[in-house]
Amino acid sequence: MIAAAPIATPAVDLWAIAPIIALVATGVGLVLIRALLRRNQAVTPVCFSVAVVGLLVAAGLLARQWHRVRDDGPIVSLADMVRVDPFAVFLGIVIVAATLAGLLLAYAYLRREDLEAPEYFALLLLSAAGMLMMTTANDLVVVFVALEVLSIPLYVLVAFDRRRLRSQEAGLKYFVLGAFSSAVFLYGIALVYGATGTTSLSGIATFLAGNTLFEQTTLLVGLGLLLVGLGFKVAAVPFHMWTPDVYQGAPTPVTAFMAAATKAAAFAAVLRIVLTAFPQYRDDWRPILWVLAALSMLVGAVAALVQNDVKRTLAYSSIAHAGYILMGVYAASSRGREAALLYLLVYAFMAIGAFAVVMIAAPGPDDAKHSYDDYRGLAVRRPVLGGLLIFFVLAQAGVPLTSGFVGKLELFGSVAQAGETSDYVLLVIGVLSAVIAFAFYLRIAWTLVTAPDDDTAVAAAYSTRPRRVDGWTGIVLAGAAALTLVVGVLPGTFIHFARDAVFF
Amino acid sequence: MTLAALEITSSYYLVLAAMVFTIGAVGVLTRRNVLVMFMCVELMLNAVNLSFVAFARALDDVTGQVIVFFVLVVAAAEVAVGLAIIVAIFRRRRHATADDLRALRG
């Protein structure tokens, strides 16, 4: 007779996943409130307030975790599947801040576009929960589940504008390519699992350190597929095709959220997987990252140059920025990691600020008019709004005294530090890309300060009543601008913050 | 030689999985009908499931089989959202092929 062996259950430290629980609970609670207050007029403000409170709770929990993991070392829980370390908490804070911005921007936007639906808030929080899960994931299966938990609500958010075909088209494109890339990523997990017998990141590293593989093809193909899958999510060339369409078609608050938060979450997975699971194979993955970084920087900058749509230009610029951050991953040093983390933080606020202005400034009702002609003379008509957009694009270009300059300097420095010929070639490509990028950022700025040529355009521009900046959007704009400026003028604190956060 | 003498090892399943995955991937990239592209993604996911089970068998480790359940759940959630988006577009357009979706260009 077989004695029933007790089933060993792993220790669960709820404290480690408390921020994720807070976001999921709020998201599910919102759906419930929505169902209970179906006919009540106040349902949207109530849901909005609950969502803000939930996010603030998550932010508070992350702040407490930060001190604990920085001083006492990482918390590893749930059978080694979750690892809360300074790296995860840092990116978690970036993600929660970006989610808060996505939430505040949406409040007035949804009313204006006649889309008022509390489901937006719930989807946003659930997506953010998946992103937090991704930052703490220490197992490829958890990375996959987190990838889907963050992506599936995003597909809906991108297609959220039911009346605008472009939004739905963007949602469908994002969905098909997102599902395709997750399947590729999953096949990568399967091959790595087949080669090493485990999916735990630390387990893979231990196995590879202790064993010499009889044949490496399975593992290397698996690693390659993992990078392809994540390349889609970070929007690195040649896996970037969806980015301009989706960024342009999605409702603008969703675009801001995607540019800031999805990028942070996806880079969390890239950094953690290549650096903790495959450190022995750095000579194999570094050339791949070199190519991805170089192509992203060049293609992103050159393609942005020929766009006629401000939202699309910013989308291509986000591809170039992904290339810059990939340089930090390519450096494969703690300096590179620090630079990548700092850049993810500063890029989040530059992107949110720029898209927040785009959200308000576009004329017309449908969030569809974003061509350069629609923006002509904006800084003359509305100096504050136009000035802010100029400030944010110049920050993205990396003008001194803005956060973009500090971020780029750190990234270029981390690559230069390695000091091999291929590093210098990448550095030259990076600088070249930054110079090309300067051209289209200046083109945006120039468009904003020049008045329209003909009188009809002037009349048209002035005939539409300018959109009022509501309080929540004002807070987001002020916060993003303040952070972009403060990091640029006094970078010390933030560099230390990022330096504390490099530890896995 | 009788058929029974032929031993089917797990590598047969892995090769089959790789072929099905490739068929699915090529399908997503070349077919124009959104529903067919969608079915090809499912084909890819199921090919991965097959290789997970084959690896689990070869490694004598249950993890691979457990992962399959996660993948099934995720695929079901994805189907729900994907079909909802397709239906939303279909209501406006009466048909759904990738060539019709070209408002976004640049």
Image (cartoon, coloured by chain):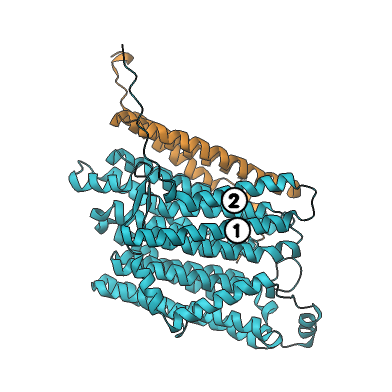
Q: In which quadrant of the rendered view does residue A311 lie?
A: bottom right
Q: Residue at x 32, y 61 (%)?
A: A71
Label 2 residue SS: helix
- The crowding category of the residue bearing disc 1, from other C-alpha atoms within 10 Å (few below 14, some 14 to 19, many at least 20), is some
- Residue A127's mark? none
- Chain A colour is cyan
Q: Which residue is mark 2?
A: A26
Q: Residues within 10 Å of mark 2 (few under 14, many from 20)?
A: many
Q: Quadrant of the N terminus of chain A?
A: top left
Q: Is there any visible trace of residue B97 in the rendered image?
A: no
Q: Residue A89, percent across and down?
A: 42, 59
Inter-mark Cα distance, 2 to 1: 9 Å
Q: Is residue A372 visible?
A: yes
Write down the residue under mark 1.
A53
Q: Are marks 2 and 1 in contact (CB under 8 Å)?
A: yes
Vertical order, A245 against B83 (above or below): below
Secondary structure of the residue carrying tag 1 is: helix
Residue B51 spot, x, y in % from top left: 38, 34
Which chain is represented by orange in the image? B
